[in-house]
Image (tube, rainbow, N blue to C red):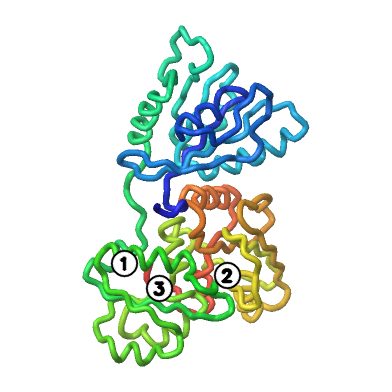
Amino acid sequence: MMARSLQKHVVIAGRVNAGKSTLFNSIMGSDVAIVSEERGTTTDAVRKSIEVPVLGPVVFIDTAGFDDDTALSEERLKKTRTEFNKADAFIYTLDNGDEAILSELAKYNKPVIKVIMAIDRDVSYDYGDAIVYRDHSSRDEIFTELKKVLNTEEESLLDGIVDGKATIVMVMPQDAAAPKGRLIKAQVEALREALDKGMTSIVVGDERLEEVRDRFTDIDLVICDSRVFKKVYDVFGKTTKVTSFSVLFSKMKGDIDYFIESAKKFDDFKGDEKILIAEACTHPPLNEDIGTVKIPAMLKKRFGNGLEFTFTRADDFDDIDDYDMIIHCGACMFNRAHVISRVRQAREKNVPMTNYGVTIAYLNDILDKIQY
């Protein structure tokens, strides 16, 4: 199945006991979420993918309800709002007193499909544009609405950079930070897309780059791990286009123009700035980790040891106001809606936000020469 980070995400929201989990289970066709009349039954978000005609696999997310009066209500609601940032669209289960919640959802500027659950209650009056969900067959009405509001254009790493006849060299160093026995997600996605589009891919480490350059004379693009950006550019930069997996993902998942613009703010650094380094993955950092080790070392070499770093992982992205720069990973584990929500938060708070690959290109003085 398509990677979950490339699937559309639909968040089911609403008040406590408005039928969210019942709806979620009906859409899935199985009892995935616990359903109970007891308030606050759903605690952590429950997610599952299902194939939707035309859209392909779609992630549906069941969330804890609003107006939960249990002891952990605030924590549950905080987790629910975190899921809102990942939504490409909302399904809202109507109940009573929904105006404030719907107003909050409207701030995310994403489609909202309203549903009134009629599986276990009498619905005999008009709910306007809401779908009256009476039984399992009603999910087709939801799928129809989703097809109207969701963008069906496939995300692409390579469109606009090379065409279907391209020959691409992918440089994948195998050091201590490389996962044993497998490739990192960004590399897999690039290989998969190149294969699907009939491109020729040449996969190499970073040891014999000159030999590869001299042997293959019709290379259209070189994609490398950002850790070896400068090394690869020095070998290939005069003869072909060069970029990194992180840069390509920042273009596909986020706002590459804002990342490039933000990176230029490094020009104003004085050496005492606070920097947030945000990573989507939750793997433990290693000695050669790019986010926690290599980028801070490069920045300190350029701007001095007075820089202050904070590191976050996964969904932790709160209280960003006091930072002078946010440096985000390529976000191959996040969907685009999630990354764009972070860009929006940074813009609203006037905090520059850039990306691992863009930062490394800047620090190596090749930012104006890379492809994206």
Q: Secondary structure at mark 1?
A: helix
**Res 15 → quadrant:** top right
Kindly identify the residue that appears in the image at 65 percent across and 66 percent down. 284
Res 100 seen here: yes
Q: Which residue is mark 1?
A: 194
In the visual, does 187 lie left or right of 217?
right
Q: Nearer the viewer, residue 14 or 182?
A: 182
Q: CA distance from mark 1 to mark 2?
A: 34 Å
Q: Residues within 10 Å of mark 3 (few under 14, many from 20)?
A: many
Res 130 seen here: no
Q: Secondary structure at mark 3?
A: strand
Residue type at numbered disc 3: Thr
Q: Nearer the viewer, residue 218 or 285?
A: 285
- Nearer to us of marks 3 and 1 is 1
Residue type at numbered disc 2: Phe
Q: The C terminus appears in which quarter of the rendering? A: bottom left
Residue type at numbered disc 1: Ala
Task: Tell which circle, 1 or 2, labels the residue nearer the N-terminal end.
Answer: 1
Relative to 147, residue 302 above or below: below
In the visual, does 324 lie left or right of 237?
right
Kindly identify the residue that appears in the image at 42 percent across and 60 percent down. 251
Please, which residue is most extreme toward the front here? 30
Q: Residues within 10 Å of mark 1 (few under 14, many from 20)?
A: many
Q: Residues within 10 Å of mark 2 (few under 14, many from 20)?
A: many
Q: Secondary structure at mark 2?
A: helix
| Image mark for residue 55 | none
- Nearer to us of marks 3 and 2 is 3
Question: Residue 66, position in %: x, y?
Answer: 64, 28
Kindly identify the residue that appears in the image at 41 percent across and 58 percent down. 252
Task: Tell which circle, 3 or 2, labels the residue nearer the N-terminal end.
Answer: 3
Q: Which residue is mark 3?
A: 243
| Image mark for residue 266 | 2
